[in-house]
Amino acid sequence: MLIKLAILLTHPVQYFAPVFRELAQQPNLQLKVFFGCNHGVIPREDPNFGVVFQWDCQPTEGFENEFLSDNYLEDLKGLTGIRLAAKAFTAINRYQPDAVLIFAYSPTFITATTLLLCLAGHKLMLRADTTDEALSRSYIKDKIRQLFLSFYYRQFTHFFPIGTDSINHYLRMGVDKSRMTLAHYAIDTEFFQKQVNFWLPQRETLRANAGIGEQDHVLIYCGKMFPPKNPLIIPDALENLSPVEKEKIWFLAVGDGELREEFERRIKVQLGEKAIFVGFKNQSELGQYYAMADTLILPSRSGETWGLVVNEALQFGLRVIVSNKVGCAKELITDIKHGGIFSCSNFLELAKMISCEIMQTKSKLRELKSFTNSSKLATNVYVQLIT
């Protein structure tokens, strides 16, 4: 029996594309993905990176899809989002799916489309990386959110939480655990393994060309440089290291954003020319920087429901220091050999962890951690419920 599945999400996301390709190959499944806009597919400025970019990993190839608008990502909010929801509802209704898998509960475009589909009697399932840990809210805002989501979640037949924090969120909102199936947020490990195989053998050459000594320790930050990611806690931590410790450290920053100028200036006050800022890099360019590094720091203070750079770094054999607001911490930093977790506001705690990292032996630094290929794992999870 052929099952028709529609998937709704705001825009193409490079990490989801392998899952959609795998689903499209299932013999008993017909798939069509509906995107609210084409953000990331055509050159366009990202509001948080602050640079014009487009993904270089073909995030819409290998599966049937439809763009519902060429609007900016920000346009999916408010009244424009409601107008686009009517268009999405019409398109999905025309497709006549047996089930609709919806990614996230916001912005307005997603919320309104969901409610319209529910009124029309469609079978709805939710895959959202929602948690109660990523953002702090006042008591009143939390209660309003709880009332809305408790109602909203009743429109779905099944849920795909991404981890422990996500499961706890759904339980708090009244969703029975029997209606959940864990679908970890993960990277396309086959794609990154090619980079591991290509770049890791060149590690010493890459480091030598940059002037990095054999015994030096390279910290890496990879991501958007804006307040929710909390990058400025890193120079605060470095300031509290001893001169001897600073002599051993290099800092590599990959990314861009509104805090880049201040971030770079303050890191260079601590490390001078041993701070290398390379700007925004696309997925296919990341491997060489992970290969040069020893420890990833992800210090987010809000909005980090998972933190996929942690998956990437671990696949390259890096150790990882993350804040307690990073969603994947409970799943991936399960052993001291993988790294550590610090309070997102405690720069002294971060400084202590950095100091400990400097003492790690080289044998530990390259202990590769393997992950189940996310596309195949997620495909099996979704197919079992859909078919």
Image (cartoon, helix red, strand yellow):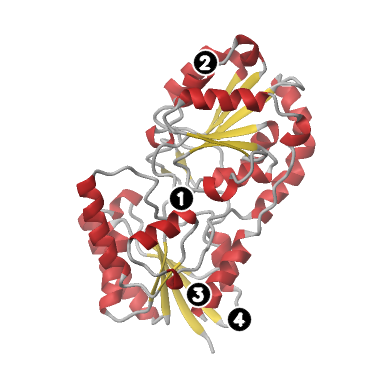
The Cα atoms of the two marked residues, 3 and 4, are separated by 11 Å
The Cα atoms of the two marked residues, 2 and 1, are separated by 39 Å
Q: Nearer the viewer, residue 370 or 15?
A: 370
Q: Earlier in the sequence, mark 4 or mark 1?
A: 4
Instruction: Classify 10 Å Cα crowding around label 4: few (below 14), some (14-19), many (20 and above).
Output: few
The Cα atoms of the two marked residues, 4 and 2, are separated by 58 Å
The Cα atoms of the two marked residues, 4 and 1, are separated by 30 Å
Which structural element holds mark 4?
Answer: loop
Which structural element holds mark 3?
Answer: strand
Query: x, y percentage for residue 343?
Result: 46, 33
Residue at 54% over, 60% down: 17
Residue at 58% over, 61% down: 18
Please report contact status of discs 4 and 2: CB closer than 8 Å, yes or no.
Answer: no
Q: Earlier in the sequence, mark 3 or mark 2?
A: 3
Q: Earlier in the sequence, mark 3 or mark 1?
A: 3
Which structural element holds mark 2?
Answer: loop
Instruction: Classify 10 Å Cα crowding around label 3: few (below 14), some (14-19), many (20 and above).
Output: many
Q: Nearer the viewer, mark 3 or mark 2?
A: 2
User: What residue type is disc 2 on?
Assistant: Asn
Label for residue 31? Answer: 3
User: What residue type is disc 4 on?
Assistant: Pro
Q: Earlier in the sequence, mark 4 or mark 2?
A: 4
The Cα atoms of the two marked residues, 3 and 2, are separated by 53 Å
Which structural element holds mark 1?
Answer: loop
Label for residue 40? Answer: 1
246 in relation to 144, above or below: above
Q: Nearer the viewer, mark 4 or mark 1?
A: 4
Label for residue 27? Answer: 4
The image quarter in which residue 351 lies: top right
Residue 21 in view in this figure: yes
165 in relation to 324, above or below: below
Label for residue 240? Answer: 2
